[in-house]
Structure formats: structure tokens, C-alpha cells
Image (cartoon, grey):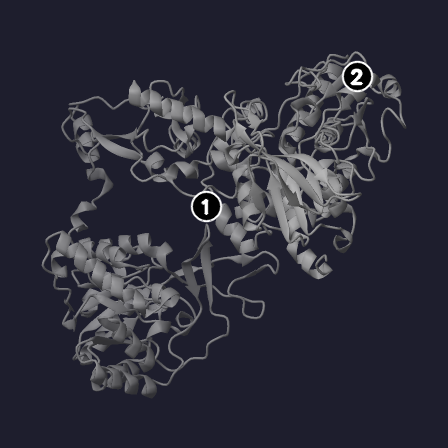
Amino acid sequence: MPLKAKTRRDAMQDIAPRYHPQEASVEAHRCLYCFDAPCIMACPTGIDIPGFIKKIATGNLVGSARVILESNILGASCARVCPTEVLCEGACVMLDRDEKPIKIGRLQRYATDAFGEQKANPFLKKMKPNGKKVALVGGGPASLGCAAELVRLGYQTTVFEKDMEPGGLNRYGIAYYKMPPEVVQREVKLIRDLGVEFRTQTEVGKDVPVEKLRKEYDAVFLGVGLGRTHRLGIPGEEKGGVVEALEFIRLIHTKPLHEISVGKRVAVIGCGNTAIDAVTQAKRLGAKEAIILYRRGEENMSAYPYEYQLAKKDGCGFIFHTAPVEVLGDKRVTGLRMIRTRTGKDGKAEIVPGSEFEEPFDMVIKALGQEKQTSIWKKLIPELKFDVAGRIECDRRTGQTSVAKVFSGGDAVNGGREVVNAVADGKKAAHGIHAMLSGKPVSGPLQASRLGHRDGAKGSGFLQPIRVPDLEAAYNRERNGKLHG
Amino acid sequence: MADLSCNLAGIHSPNPFWVASGPPANTAYQCHRAFEAGWGGLVWKTIGEPIVNVSSRYSSLDLYGNRMVGLNNIELISDRSIETNFREIKECKKRWPQRAIIASLMADTRENWHEMMQRSLDSGADGVELNFGCPHGMCERGMGSAVGQNPDVMEKIVGWVMEVAQIPVIVKLTPNVADITRPARAAKKGGANAISLINTINSITQVNLDTMCAEPSVGGRSAHGGYCGPAVKPIALNMVHSCAMDPEVGLPISGIGGISNWKDAAEFIALGSTSVQVCTAIMHYGFRIVEDMIDGLNDFLDAKGMKSVNDLRGLAVQSVQKWETLDLHYKRMARIDYDKCIGCNLCYIACEDGAHQAIAMVSPNGQGLGPGRLPGKSIPKIKEEACVGCNLCALVCPVEKCITMVDISTGLDPMSWEEYQVRLASGKMKAIPAHD
């Protein structure tokens, strides 16, 4: 029996609510206002973080949001979903003073939320239309990032989105308690207000031929993301009650919460961040038990540690070193036959012979990562080159693919990373497109908090983001070197 | 345990911490609470012809998330009758014979001053403090700072008081003057036994940008008030020092102005105060703060090997001299401890934009990983030839002892500006070349 709607709504409430003004003020005042700050270097979109925090401290919230949106048009989404622990907050100098890093994500949310409630113009200056047109395929974060940048550079931009609404995974694929639809809808409205045209329910390759776009537009950006969830490849996969994680999450974002059907005992197969989003939401929507099955160990999971902690706090179960071999049941799933695995000599998971066992489940959610869309796009643009992993090949600095006038970025290129990486890719491609069409490089925004600010965002995270795990590794190497050297 | 007892011109108290004349010293109830908490003395809220106050009386300066760094008030002297006040003083003095109770007074005519002095004596007060400092409301009526700002008038009124004084008389000075030693000398000439300073500073703390009315708003209209609290401490210290240094003043001092803890108190005493008075910090946190003031001062005196708080008094007075006596050959320079540096670069930008461009951002090679744990991230480095030893980098550095200022030997004998002028005039040396 699903829980009552009110309880479900409560269960899906924001996990990190917006700061109250005083909380925001106290946190903003903690920021040292570093010059040439490490957090900027750790932000893939190169947001002038101390700059926007200082503005929160002075009560200039619109100005603060403007600083954020100047670098990252999806600043409101990123404030909610960025893995800040390994990005900006992980690079905060407070850590070197053995203190908690500044809560950059929550401050960013505070400013962008406040901005969303006002009718202020995010950008003070706008370029004149230059008469050139760019088509963007797919309405996810990469295209949104690219389109917003292009329209501000004077281009006429059109986003083609096959779904009902633009936003991509931001709109349909992230846990509700982190990202309610209104946030994305507000962002899309902002981008539309900048002058970007959206053609929704229009699938390129079906409703509009790619050739038409390539002919009629001066450039085409492919922000097409990834495809369906990988199949389990085991008998019984087509039975009722076996769903894809992204489909499950999509339902939560498109139907009233009380209409979502959730099993009593739910198995989620896979252990990435989407698997966590699925298992926690299944639990919050009323599943008695929601359990992650993962063929490898705790140490191998790709979910971030804080996501893992969240699932544990929600009371979700974890069964490691276990792989499904068959979906049991007549027409509907009644359970899973599984087998134990262990780590083989080559470091890969291998099955333990004779260790099969069965567990009852009335819902199975597949969260094995998404397939590449290689075959579709090979058909649509035969000259398009792909790397061995099936990702669209392009110059990572400009987004330029192997095909003239065709650019790309986001998950289709990086294989599936964060929203902020997609936005950064989109921005880089916008600059690449502008350089190609105008023959002039784009000068980055002036960032008063940065050394050599006349060079724009040079050296910021936008061009060469640092990742905190890499920092840690380098730090350890250095320390060890020092100790032994 | 050091001896904290003090004697200000014959007013004895078991410790130097007095509640200053103000809202916390308004009633017998508050006086009892203060003495229960441990305060050594209390200067009663100024007694005079009862006034009528406005509603909405205080406003504050809040800074970087800290509340009430400075406080502004437009409250007047006691709004209670003269009889009530003196009756309560008598009652308190009876219950707390060892603590000092000082009646703060404000009057206009010679007769009235005489009468107030008599009433003070009758109440058993240990002394009186003449309020010549209140900067609002009373001065318009020819009292308060209207007296304190006019040394001749002040001297005359102090003289009236001294005609009948049988208990010590403290004159409270207003800081709203160009030279604090002038009213202090006037108090001395008038025969006062001690001075207390500073009273509040004329102020407007803030303007409400929505209503375009300054705070505190009294139904949409405001008036300038008197400023106090931690923000005024540096101004008060300087004025206390000026009076302590001036041989023509030569009066015991009760220090007032932004004192919130034992360290503040110790600084006032080191610059010449005998007792110290506290108001704003009590208004913020209550009388309980005195516990740490007593405890902290005691521990400090013990640690420094001082047997009595009197040993501390005035120790720093001579350290502050005229600028022209300072050694032009003394040199100090900033040193950065890279093991402590967190890479915020505040020192760099402060020096680059706000001082002398004496810090460079350089490759961390040779300094290990560099601050902020970022491999290859540039680090701040002092340009020794450009550093003027101004201290700014050390002041902005958020990490304790990361930037220290170290003495640099110049090998030259000390030379003050005064001596420099003499040597220049006599042709013994050439002018020190100007900076580029």
C-alpha cells in the first residue's frame, strides 16, 4: 500500500532547505574572500565564488546571482546537484585551517533562489544580434549552457527538444528531493527570456532532418546526452515491475506523487548516483524495503560518499558482491535469482560458482548507467567520429567534432558526468562556435577576484578544472616525496 | 591571587570593575544584581530633575555578522525622581558597604549643585561623578556636554561643587572636543579629585534605506545620539592616554569606552586608569561578564608576577610618545610561514592594491606543494627590497602567526625625526632620498 499523498510529499521535501537570511549572512561572512581563490579553480564553469559570496554578505542578492549566472546559467540547478565536496568546497582554504569549508552550494542556492523570485535582469549588457543562427540538438544542460552563451554573444539560437519540456536530466532525471521541476522550469524561462527559441516535442532525425539543420544554420551543437539504461541481459527482464531507474525518476517528476506505484520490496541494481536517487526515492515513496544490489564492493561504488550516507540514513539496504541472474515470476516480478561474486585476480568481479540464491522482490529498478547513442548518430551523421568508448569525438577546448560546423559537449562527449561539466562543455562549444564564425576568440568575463583579471577566466576552473581527488593524490604524493626525499 | 582592590581618589572598591552610569545602573534592583555578580563599584545613572524619554532609544552598528560592535543611544538621564534615586542608593550602600557607589549628578544652578551634593552625602555614596558629557537632550538645556565642551564654564561649575564637597568628586569628560586635555585641565583647576572618560561620542549609526530615516526612529524622525561599545575603544584609549601623559592634568582616571573584557580593562589600566567602567557590554550580555573580567585579570597579573593591579597601572603610558621621537632607522619586515599559509592571498591583494606592492605571486617551486594544497598554485612571496614593514599583510592574514613581522638590523644608530632635522640643518647628513 502506498503511503498517503501528504506523507509522500513530506518525504520528498527538499533535503537541504534554503538558508534563512541570517544563516546565509553568517555563512557568507565566514568566507575569507580569498583573492584568486582555489574554489574558482575547482569550478568547471569558473564562477567567481568569493565574488558572489561577498555580495550575499552585503545583501546584494541580485548582484550575487548575476555573478553566478554570468559564468553558469544553470547556477540554480548546480547549487542543488553539484558534488561540491569534490569541487569548490573541496578546494576551500578553510580545510587548510582545519575548519569546515564554506557552504558554497547552499549559498549559491540562496542567491539564485532569491534571484528567481525577482524580476531582475540577470545580465547588464547584451551583444547586438549578429544575424547568425545556431541549432542545438537536445535541451539538456549542455545545450542550455551553450545556447545561453551564444545568445548573449548575439546569435539566434534554437533548441530542439524531443520531450515535453526542455531541461534534460535536470528536468526528468534527478531525485525530486534535490531538484523539483520548478527550479528547472525557472531556469528554462530565464534562458527563453534571453532570446533562445525552444522547439519542444521535436526530435531531430525524426521530426526534423539533421541535414536541414546543417544547411539552414551556421552551426549545429549536439547536446544529445546518453540513451536508455543498459539492459541486465538476464532472463525475465521484460516482466512487469522491472523498470529503468531514469524512467522511475521521470515518473516522479511528471505525475502527482500519490499516483506513483512503488513495490513493497524494491531491488535497485547498480550503485552509481542514479541508483542512489532511485533507491532513496523508492523508500521515501513508501517501499518497506529498498535494497541496492551491486556486483562489486562498497569501495568500488561510483556513488559519492555523501550519496551513500544519505541512502543509509534513509534506511535503504545494500547487498554487495552480488549479481542478478534471473528475474523470477509469472507476468510480474516476484523475486530475483542472484549469485555471489568476488573480486578476481584481474580486479574485476567474477562469480562464485554454486552460490546462487533467491530473494523475493515485487519491483526491480535497473540503474546500470546509460547506453551511448552511437548507432543512432552514426546513421544521422555518417561522417561523425566516435572514440573507442562510443563517445562523440571532439576538441575538448572548443567542442569542434570531426564534422565541419558540428560541435558537441556534455554526456554525449564525456560519457556521463555532472551537470556542471555539461554546462562548461556547452560554454566552451559556444566559444568555439563564436571563434569559428567570427574569427575572433571570446574574451572571458572579468573576474575582479582573480589574478590577472584582464585575461578573463584564464586559469580558472572553466578551462582547467581541478578535481579534489586529484588534489588529494597530488598532496599525498608531495608529502610522501618530502618524507622520503 | 593578585590584589585587585583599587582606590580612586579615596573611593575604595574590591576590584577596578565598575558599572558605568547608564541603563544598567538605573535601580536598586540592578545594583544588587551587579554586586551579586561581583562588580566592585557602580556609578548610578545620572540623577537630576526627572526627564521624559522617547520610545525607541538605541541603535547599533553591526559588523560582518557581529551584533552591536557599536551602540548609539538617545536616552536621557534618570527618569526617576531625585528622592527615589537617593533612597535606593542609601539602601544599596547599606547592603553592600564594601562596594563603591558613586552618584552621577547633573544640575544647573549653584544652589541645585549644592543641594545635590548634600543629598549624595546623606545617601552614603562613596563619591560623585559630574556628568558633563551627555551629548544629547541635556546639552540643549545648558547641561551635559554643553558644560564639558566649555572649559571655563566647567571650571566654574566644578568650583561650585567643590565648595561643599565632602566626598571625592569625579568629573566625567565628553570626547566631543578637539583636545581632551583642555576640559581635563579645567576639571583640575576647578578642584576635582578625579576624571572619568570617555562619555559617548556624537553619532548616527545607520540610515534605514527604505524609510530614509536614521536609526533609532522615533515615529519616523531621529536625532543624533551618543556612541559607545567596542568600536569606540581605540578613541577612548587615546584620550585616556592624553590625560595620563599631561602633567597639568595629574588626576586619577576612571577609564571608560568599549571595555568588554579583562584585556580591554588591562589596556586602560596600562595607559593610566585606576578603575574602569563598563556599560555596553553589560547591556549586551548582562552583569555576569564581570566573573571573567576578575578571573582573567587575576590570572594575567599572576602570570606577569604582579602582586597588585596597581603594579599594572600606567606601564604603557610612556610607550606612546610624539611621532617625531620615533626611530627612523628602525626596520621590520614581513615573514610568511609556508607551513601555515592556506593560500587565500589576502596578503597579496592587500599589499598590491592597498599598500606598497611588496608581495609577489610566484611559483611554489622550492617551497613544497604550496598553499591551498593546489599543486603548482602560485604562492605569495615578500619582496624584501620593497617591504616597508607596514604590518598590513600580517593584519589581514586570517591564520594566526602565519605572517610575522621581524626586526631587521640596519646597523644604524637610532635617529628620530627631531634628530634628523638637527643633522640636516647642521649639514651632518644629506636628506634621505625620496621613494621612486
Picture coordinates of residue A282 (x, y %)?
Answer: 67, 48
Picture coordinates of residue B167 (x, y %)?
Answer: 17, 78
Q: Is residue B345 visible?
A: yes
Three-letter residue code for mark 1: Arg
Considering only vertical position in the picture, is B325 above or below B6? above
Name the chain under label 2: A
The C terminus of chain A sits in image quarter:
top left
Point 71% across, 31% down: residue: A234
Picture coordinates of residue B103 (x, y %)?
Answer: 27, 77
**Which residue in the rendered view is the most extreme toward the front?**
A354
User: Horizontally, is A415 left or right of A332 in the view?
Assistant: left
The residue identified by callout 2 is A378
Three-letter residue code for mark 2: Lys
Which image quadrant for residue A405? top right
User: Horizontally, is A358 left or right of B317 in the view?
Assistant: right
Point 61% across, 30% down: residue: A45
Name the chain under label 1: A
The residue identified by callout 1 is A30
Secondary-structure class at tag 2: helix
The answer to whether the residues at label 2 and label 1 have Cβ atoms under 8 Å apart is no
Same-chain status of marks 2 and 1: yes
Name the N-terminal-most of marks 2 and 1. Answer: 1
Considering only vertical position in the picture, is A110 above or below B247? above
Considering only vertical position in the picture, is A439 above or below A164? above
Tally of numbered tags: 2
Q: Which mark is residue B71?
A: none
> Which is in the foreground here, disc 2 or disc 1?
2
